[in-house]
Amino acid sequence: MIDAGVERSEDAPYVPKDFQFLPGEYVYFSFHISGFGGKLNEKTETRTISLEYELTPQDANHVALTQPVKGVIQDELGKEDKNWIPKRRASFLLPSFVAAGTFQIHVVVKDLIAKSEAARDYPFEIGGVHVGNAGSLGVESFNFLRNQDDTASLELPAYAPGDTVWARFQMIGFKYEAGNKYKLSYGLKVLRPDGKPFLDAPNAAQISSDSFYPAPYVPGDLQITTPKNAERGSYQLTLTVRDEVSNQTFELKRTFTIE
């Protein structure tokens, strides 16, 4: 029998069902094991136990978020230990890029003497970025911002001459090389109200990394500085994202105004 729960910090109370961890945070976990067998030594009146356990945080598709935590419990118990049950703790560092949703810690305990096994799942929630199911390269949640650190997007992306135009987005649906390595790049082109080029940066950013857990999205951001004498009117922005692994390209068009 396994009695366990997910915690916010070591030996803290179990988190409520609606509690949300965030990407890059630690998830703590503790558990007790009972109902295990043992090998009795009649001469010494002691009982030998031998247990193995494995803990794996997983997503809804049973893909591991991190390396599993494994352990062995081997002990010799006397008569005074007949009610003793072992307790163990573990912690897991969540990936930096993981989509919001319901996850679980999969627990497997093996009793090597009784030759039995028990398994249970303990759910927990991760908040943050919600990502759709993308079959191909795409961009989600493109938002214009007033300032670099803003979390709320602009309903009407209107700026004054001399302002910096900020934008944030997520790239999704890209492919991986061995080791869950992705290679992405994006370019930016902006046209003035008269249709003439205002900005042309075909290689604005290049992003390449790998991770244990396949990243479901990679964030991107844009910074466009406008001159104080910028022409007033509507500007057309074209964002071109490239997946260097699959050789796919995705183009997104948005507009903002200078008033």
Image (cartoon, rainbow, N blue to C red):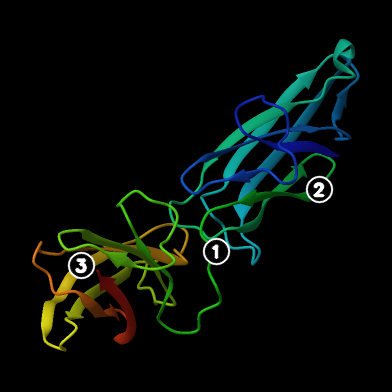
Identify the image quadrant of residue 234: bottom left
Q: Which residue shows up at 88% across the image and 15% down it?
A: 43
Mark 1: amino acid: His
In the rendered view, tell whether residue 38 sits above or below residue 111: above
Left or right: residue 87 versus residue 152 is: right
Query: Number of labelled discs?
Result: 3
Give the number of the mark in front: 2 or 1: 1
Mark 3: amino acid: Ala
Q: Which residue is mark 1?
A: 130
Judging depth in this view, the residue of 63 and 128 nearest the camera is: 128
Q: Earlier in the sequence, mark 2 or mark 1?
A: 2
Asked if residue 244 shows in the view, the reply is no
Extreme residue in the top direction: 80
Where is residue 258? Give x, y as percent. Answer: 23, 70
Extreme residue in the bottom direction: 195
Q: Which residue is mark 3?
A: 205
Q: Which residue is mark 2?
A: 118
